[in-house]
Amino acid sequence: MSIKENLELVKQNIADAVTKVGKKPEDIILVMATKTVDPERIREAIHADGRIIGENKVQEALKKYEVLKGENAEWHFIGHLQTNKVKDVLKFASMIHSVDRMSLVEKLDQRLRHDGRSMDILVQINTSYEESKYGIAPEEAISLVKQIARYDTLKIRGLMTIGLFTKDEVKIRKCFKLLKEINDKIIKEGIDRAEMKYLSMGMSGDYQIAIEEGANMVRIGTAIFGARPTPDAYYWPSEKTDADRE
Ligand SMILES: *Cc1c(COP(=O)(O)O)cnc(C)c1O
């Protein structure tokens, strides 16, 4: 199947899933996860009406952005962000899905202040409690959101999570329910400047479940572009490095 056909199928599946929750297809924002996908295939997807590109590695993204910046697309950063890549991520991203620690918040704030601008962000939460996954622990999430909300350079727009990798639907659903729960608690607390608009959850294997649990932003790669040549371990290292623990 072509990228265009895959995209149409994904959009149809999204449309089917939203009817169960009383939303409209246009309420769900599709982010195309494009790690390992070369610029020409990404261009094909943009021309097939894919509007948002989600990249995982800053250097890889910048190279593609140089080729594709004339195209009508928005670029999100969805991968783990190292503090030494902050300056470069700001060159292309209009939203960062993976803000998960204060050391990163401080670096982002410094750079944004220097540039005299702001950035839309999502706070990434580790709802699966897997040691290998990035994201703040669910118990610490609200406190992190409160701290981030003090920085006017960072516009909090919602939360992001990666569901547990398993065939067990109940366990996957539990991750998404937890993100929604934390989101509702944050709304209830009425934290100033935390605009909880987006729940970024759901990937190729679980986006219908995510939508049923309240996702309005899904990040989909394989279902659009096919299987990836590089193992995901390269993008989600199973061992966190010291630099990541800062
Ligand atoms: C790769 C990736 C996705 C998409 O994964 P697929 O299973 O290929 O749809 C979504 N979110 C993040 C953070 C990713 O790294």
Image (cartoon, rainbow, N blue to C red):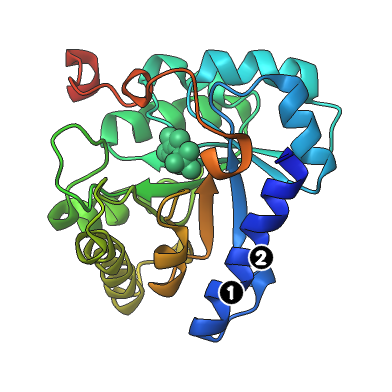
Q: Amino acid at mark 1?
A: Asp
Q: What residue sits 84% from the left and 32% below the top?
A: 71
Question: How far, Cα to Cα, is label 1 from label 2?
Answer: 6 Å
Query: With 152 as the anchor, is 69 left or right in this view?
Result: right
How would you rate the neighbour count of disc 1 (Cα within 10 Å): few for under 14, some for 14-19, many for 20 or more?
some
Which residue in the structure is indicated by mark 2? Answer: 12
**Residue 25 in sight:** yes
Amino acid of disc 2 = Gln
Classify residue 150 as left or right of residue 11: left
Q: Residue furthest front?
A: 1
Name the secondary structure under disc 1. helix
Q: What numbered label is drawn on residue 151?
A: none
Residue at 53% from the left image edge and 73% from the top image edge: 17
Residue carrying label 1: 16
Residue 116 placed where, x, y %?
62, 33
- Residue located 65% across and 78% down the image: 24
The answer to whether residue 246 of the structure is visible from this angle is no
